[in-house]
Image (cartoon, helix red, strand yellow):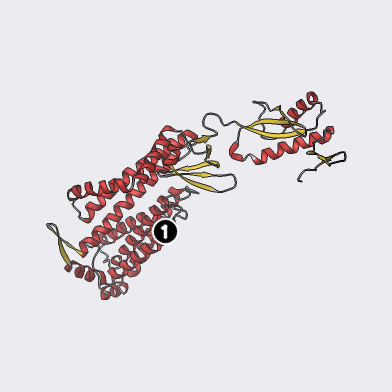
Amino acid sequence: MNTTSTLPQLSLDQVLAALRHPHAWIELAAVAIAVGLAWLMVRLLRGAEAPRGSIWFGDRIVDGVFFPVLALGLTYGVRALLQVLAIEVSLFRIVLPVMVSFAVIRLSVRVLSAAFPESRVVRMAERTISWVAWAAVVAWVTGVLPQLLEELDQVHWKLGTSQVSLRTLLEGSLSAGFVLMLVLWASAAIESRLLQGATGEQLSLRKAAANLVRAALTFVGLLLALSAVGIDLTALSVLGGAVGVGLGFGLQKLAANYVSGFVILAERSLRIGDIVKIDQFEGKVTDITTRYTVVRAPSGREAIVPNETLITTTVENLSLADRHLLLQSPVSVAYGTDLQALMPALVERVRAVPRVLADPAPSVLLNAFGADGLDLVVCYWIGDPENGQGNVRSDVNLAVLALLNEQGVEIPYPQRVLRLEGQGTALIAEPPGR
């Protein structure tokens, strides 16, 4: 991205002379008008509020891309108007490089923030890009940068059949960075559009499409960036074949995870929002990327599961075909309890618990004749397992306990018979917890 041919080269004396020029106040007023018009136009186009994280409008108007680009265009227009009015312009030679640098900074920062919203590296990159851009502007307007570029042009070497200099490499790297920035911008915009308003199955399909688009655009952008640097892509064909074989053996697991990610999203065997159980970890699927899947447990813990694991092992999906989940609460009552009257009462009491579904209806079963009492099982269904299971199980147990206390039903203690040699027998009832 060569800007040296479009911006005038200045020296320090020329900068000071431009600031002392008689028309400097007129130029400053014209620049202020251009910036004010740019702010007003962006404010009108943006409306009262813009979408959070908008690349074009930003969060505060001036931190988006549209404002510096529009201000730069209006400043060029004002300069042309002053030249038509035969007013000598000199201060614009300082203002225009500053505005170009500001536009480049905002573009880079907004695109990186949209592409990597949770990355701490973005903050570091923002500061680095800002310092480098402003330092380049200062060096340019003071005449240091053109001399430095000429010196870099003198350092060159032969690469294949072409001559490469440090200046060419620097300008090619800037062009490559600009191309990759545009690719990240396009992929972030497409992903945002695809995922907007999607839920359930649509969200999984659109996530797969977004990942595919981003991978394709990144690959194309990488090729364009290499071309911008001056690397002949045809020379990489032989080397690429050898490197591809080596990477194929070294990155088998990584490639398997990427392929598995696309298979999962395409088959929809797992969807964002599903409740799954993998080995002993159970939770809600919160994200499916091309390499791994994030599962969040009700306790707040998150498991990052490689996609290959989800393909090659058994995964219990509690909400694939039906979101209804059966829960059970065991309870014991003493022998002699009237189960014909107790069991219907338990059903009605459990049915009144919030989150317990009326259809399928709860039920109470006689599970076993225990050593200390009759073992019952209270069965009930919930339709929102993502809201947790322990809380609704606790509510059901409290409701069952309240009913047993109301009806005077005894919850049996474990009983043990102690036989002493030469004496009689003693029946000992152990309270719970012993």
Residue 2 in view: no
228 shown above or below 13: above
Relative placement, left or right, of 177 versus 424 is left
> Quick one: 167 or 45, which is closer to the camera?
167
48 shown above or below 122: above
202 shown above or below 27: above
Q: Position of residue 309 (x, y in %)?
A: 44, 41
Which type of secondary structure does the marked residue at label 1 adopt? helix
Name the residue tied to disc 1. 121
Residue reaching furthest to the top: 340
Q: Position of residue 274 (x, y in %)?
A: 52, 37
Relative placement, left or right, of 242 versus 136 is left
Q: Position of residue 30 (x, y in %)?
A: 35, 62
Residue 314 in view: yes
Q: Quadrant of the N terminus?
A: bottom left
Q: Residues within 10 Å of mark 1 (few under 14, many from 20)?
A: few
